[in-house]
Amino acid sequence: MTTKDIKRYKTKPFDSWKLAKELRMNHYREIAESRTEKGKKLLIGGGTESMLGLPAGLGEYVFFGGEPYAASMSAGDPAFAVECMEATESAGFARDLCAYMRDYLGSFLLDRYYFGGPFPKADFYLQTHFCDTHGKWYQIVSEMVGVPYFSTDFVPLRWDETVEGRQQKVEFFTGQLLDAIEWMEKITGIKYQDELLIEAVKNEFRTTSLWAECAVLNQAIPAAMDEKSMYSFYILAVLMRHRPEVVRFYEILRDEMKDRVANQIAAVPTERFRLLHDSQPPWYALHIFRYLEKFGVACVGANYEFGLSGGWDYKPGEYLRPAVPPQDRGVPLKDREDACRALAEWWLDYHLIARGIRFSGPGRNALVMHMLKDWHCDGLMIHLNRGCEGLAVGQMEIRLALVEAGIPVMTYEGNVGDPREFDEGRTLARIDAFMESAGLKILEE
C-alpha cells in the first residue's frame, strides 16, 4: 500500500513550539544564574512531583527538579548520561536504582551541569516522597552538600479508597505541608507571605487542568498532537506549573489544539492506526515514535505524560475529564491553611498517576482500558522500563488483561535514562512484528 491509497490529512508544525522551547531553556538558564549576582535568588532542589508552589511565600526562587533534568541529558547527550551513570555506580550506588536518580547524582558527583558550568548547589532541598527512591535521593545530596532537607510523605489514594481513608490522607498531607512552611521560614529566616502561596497554587491548579484539556482534545481523529511532540509540551507543567507564564502557555496551546481539531490538522498525516504508550519513553531513542509513523501509526499519548502534572477528574467506569480548579468551584483560599488543604486534595483526588498508576491490579487495568477507549486506540505499546520501579509495577498484569480482552498489545524492553539497557535493533524488530500482526506495512516515503 502507498500513501496514494489511504486518506491523507493536512499537517503543519505547532505555532506554540517555539514558545515552549524558550520557556524551558529560560528555566534552565535561570537555574544556572541563580547562584550569580546577575540572577541571585533562592535555588530549591527536589523532585518535580513535589509541591513546586509551596516555597512561593518566600518570594523569588527557582525550583531545580531532578527528573526532567535527567531526562534532558539522556535525550540530548546519551554519552554524558552514561558517564553520569558510571560515576554514580563507581560511588557505590546500585545499578537498579531509579535511572533519573543515577543520572542526577552522577552529574552532581562530576560537578558538571548539562546546560553549562558547574552543577548548581541548592540552598535547600524540598521533596515529596511518593515513589521508590525519591525520599532518599535528595537526602543523599543534601548530606553531601551540607544544606537542609525536608521531605513530606505522600500516600496516594487507592482506586477503591473509602471516604474515611481519603479524609485521613487529606489531613495527614495537609499537616505536612504546613510543617514544611514553618521549616522553610526557620531555615531561611524569611517571613512567609501567604498571598504569594495562594497565587502559586491557583496557577498550579489552572496549569494542570489546562494540560488535561489539551490531552482530551487529542481524542479527535486525526490526532492533533503526536507522542514525541507531547514530550515538549507537557514538560512545562512538570517544571514550573506554579508560574503565570506557564498558565498562559497552556491557554495558547489549548486554543491551538482546538483550531487544529476543528480543521483536521493531523500530527501524522497518514494516520490509520492509533496507539497508547505506557510508562516513560527511552529518552535517547525517541526516534522509535517517528518509525511508527512510517506505518501510518499515531501514538496519541500515554498515562505518563497525561497523568504527570495533569489535573483529572476520574470516576472508574464512568468518566475521565479535566478537573475544575478549586477557585472555580468556590473553594475558599484565604490563607495558608486553605491553600495547603486545597493542594493536598488536588493531588489526592486529581493527580492521575497518584490515583491510578501507582498501584497494580484492577484499578490500574481499568484506567488503561478507559484511556484506550476514550482516545480511540487500536492497541497499547508498553515500555518495560527497568529505570523506573514505580511505573513498572503491574505492567505485565496490564498486558495479560488486554490479551484476555482481545486488545493488541506490544512490549519492548529498555530504560528511561540508561542507554546501555536498550537494544534498538530488537525494539524495531518487535515493532515490525507487531505492525505485521495488525496488517500494516511501511508506507512508501
Image (cartoon, rainbow, N blue to C red):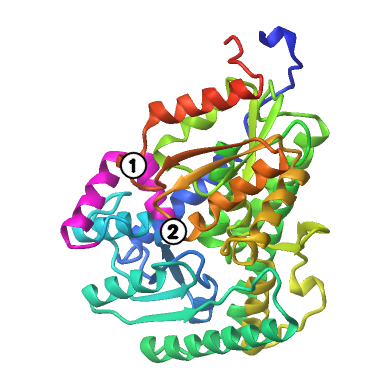
Q: Position of residue 90 (x, y in %)?
A: 16, 57
Q: Position of residue 306 (x, y in %)?
A: 63, 52
- Which of the pair 219/340 is nearer the observer? 219
* Tag 2: amino acid: Glu
Helix, strand or loop at label 1? It is helix
350 versus 100 height, above or below: below
Q: Residue at x 37, y 53 (%)?
A: 70
* Tag 1: amino acid: Glu
Q: Which range is magenta?
A: 67-93
State whether residue 38 appears in this view: yes
Residue 389's disc is 2
* Residue picked out by circle 1: 421
Q: Position of residue 294 (x, y in %)?
A: 57, 20
Q: Residue at x 39, y 30 (%)?
A: 424
Q: Position of residue 232 (x, y in %)?
A: 54, 44
399 versus 45 height, above or below: above
Helix, strand or loop at label 2? It is helix
Q: Mark 1 to mark 2: distance in Å?
A: 15 Å
Quadrant in which the C terminus appears:
top right
